Amino acid sequence: MSWSERVALVTGASQGIGKACALALAEVGAKVVVAARSAEKLIETAQEITEAGGEAHIVHLDVTDSAQIIAAFANVKEKYGRLDILVNNAGITRDGLSMRMKREDWDAVITANLTGSHLCIQQALPIMLRQRYGRIVNVVSVVAQTGNPGQANYVASKAGLIGLTKAIAQEVASRTITVNAVAPGFIATAMTEKIVDAARDRLLQMIPLGRMGTDREVAVAVRFLASDEAGYITGHVLNVNGGMYMG
């Protein structure tokens, strides 16, 4: 099948890496369902896609709400009758030292980043299993592999998502469904703009390529894993980190 026959759903598509993923998939002709909590920003993403000649469909989705997840995937099935690609990108941070971390901050991050991704996969799989085809790409983080002080909840959620990726990859491989992860390093987004200059300089010293990455560089990696050409890759973590972690 060509890209134009593929239907993709991207969570957290209102900004940053998620938006870049949606644009990159639409660029090659996929029909893209953009999903996030922010209606206004989703409209902007969808407009960029349609103005460039692509097709976008908006679904309002809070990945911490299981009822919204069920409704979103039902919406996609009703509109398109299929779902070929799921990009689990939605996520949050609530940083703090582990010994002082509030339970609600721990729970919020695990629920959004790990449980939400799992629930989205659960809704996508019945559709993909019937098709005997699917591409699931989970956006994780370099800190899931290296650790990071002050982010125990975030690191645990993303490391857990790597484990989930590998487990489900084994469960569904016989149905031509691949499950992979992309692990961005430090990417120039609205989130990293908050890093003060001194901290930014220290970070750059840890990156062999000497610069932050772009959301576009992450998006094209996601698009590759979502392609037919990546059909013999599953359970893999693709690092997009400028050499910061080479495990």
Image (cartoon, rainbow, N blue to C red):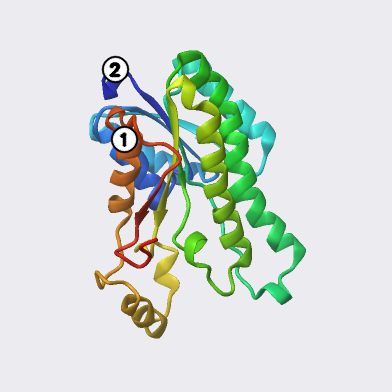
Q: Which residue is tagged 1? A: 25
> Who's the residue at 34% across and 61% down the image?
241
**Is label 1 in contact with label 2 (beta carbons under 8 Å)?**
no
- Image position of 188 (left or right of 195): left
Residue under numbered circle 2: 1
Figure quadrant of the C terminus: bottom left
**Which residue type carries mark 1?**
Leu
Tell me if I can see residue 63 in this picture: no
- How far apart in space, not on screen, are marks 1 and 2 (Cα)? 15 Å
In the rendered image, residue 196, in percent from the top left (x then y), is placed at 42, 80
- Return the x and y of residue 242 as percentages of the image width and height: 29, 64
**Quick check: 82 left or right of 222?**
right
Foreground pick, 60 / 158: 158
Residue type, numbered disc 2: Met
In the picture, the disc for residue 199 is none
Where 147 sits versus 71, above or below? below
Q: Is residue 214 visible?
A: yes
Q: Secondary structure at mark 2?
A: loop
Residue 153 on image: x %, y %: 63, 62
Residue 173 shown left or right of residue 100 in the figure? left
Q: Is residue 219 above or below residue 156?
A: above
Q: Position of residue 26 (x, y in %)?
A: 30, 33
Residue appearing at x 66%, y 49% in the figure? 111
Q: Residue 235 or 86: which is nearer the viewer?
A: 235
Q: How many marks?
A: 2
